[in-house]
Image: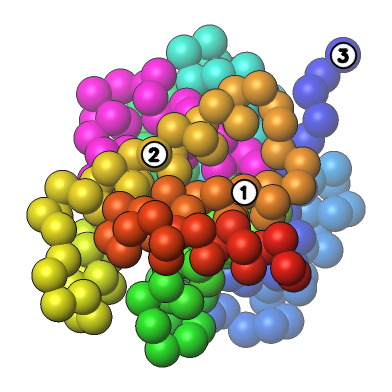
Amino acid sequence: MSPERIVLSRDKLATAVGDRWSDSELSEAVALLGQADGRFPAGVRSLPADLVQAVQRERLLASMLHTAAEIGYRALTVQDVLSRAGISRPTFYEQFEDKEDCFLAAFDAAAAQLRGRVEAAARESGPHWRDRLRAGLEELLRYVDEEPEAARTVIVEARASSPAGLRRRDELLDDFAGCIDSLVRDELAEPPSAIAAAGVVGGIESVLYSRLQRGETDELSSLVPSLMYFAVLTYAGHEAAGDELDGAALA
């Protein structure tokens, strides 16, 4: 039995490929994919060639995220990705050098989406660092809930990938740590060493890694008070951290 074919929604496709093409062209691309079991008909000529290429790339990235989450980076092959994408091997190698190259591109796309969502949520929240940190955490957990395959790839499978994948993961964690450190330094008179932010991020990542490994992704929002307690304790002490748990109990 062949694996289920990856199908991209119009909204996901539009988000992925940007605004270089018109709504009618994107709608036609989605319609063509829907008419042919998630793949373009052979020799399609009604769409711009660069749009077809961009859509094929996004289908391969989506298939890589799905396949890595389903069977793991170490076990997957290029053929596994092709089977789920419904794309030929020559088309794959027009886009990527090998399995690792495709995985890194998929990781980069997922990490950029995650980073953008978390930073936007923090920026648009309340005026204080705890408000912004809480909003960022809530958005992180929402991302894991809404994009479980991407989240598993970024948080779990990157650990088991290549040295380049591990570096990408470390860079993402360092980026989040830098954001938290900057957030806190803007408000606290005597902030701790920058290494504290790395500890906070590492602790949060460890909790999510464990949950994803065990498939325990229901009600992730319930983790917010405990994670906030851990983070606030680092910067503001027991009393302030306790407020996070008390506030959740009263909510």
Against 53, residue 3 (above or below) is above
Pick the quarter of the image with the N terminus: top right
Whether residue 137 is in magenta: the answer is no
**Label 2: few (<14), some or many (≥20) within 10 Å?**
some
Residue at which label 2 appears: 203
Question: How far apart, in angstroms, are the residues tagged by discs 3 and 2?
Answer: 41 Å
Q: Amino acid at mark 2?
A: Gly
User: Of 26 and 244, which appears nearest the observer?
Assistant: 244
SS assignment at label 2 = helix
Looking at the image, tell me whether mark 1 or mark 3 is earlier in sequence order: 3
Looking at the image, tell me whether mark 2 or mark 1 is earlier in sequence order: 2
Task: Please report the residue visible at 16 percent of the width from the left and 66 percent of the height from the top.
Answer: 191
**Label 1: few (<14), some or many (≥20) within 10 Å?**
some
Residue at which label 1 appears: 223
Residue 62, percent from left and from top:
60, 44
Colour convention of the picture: rainbow
Q: Residue furthest top?
A: 75
SS assignment at label 3 = loop
Picture mark count: 3
The magenta region covers 147-175
Residue 61 located left or right of residue 238: right
**Magenta part, dominant SS:** helix
Residue 189, percent from left and from top:
14, 77
Residue 192, percent from left and from top:
15, 58
Instruction: Please report contact status of discs 2 and 1: CB closer than 8 Å, yes or no.
Output: no
Task: Please report the residue visible at 66 percent of the width from the left and 22 percent of the height from the top.
Answer: 214
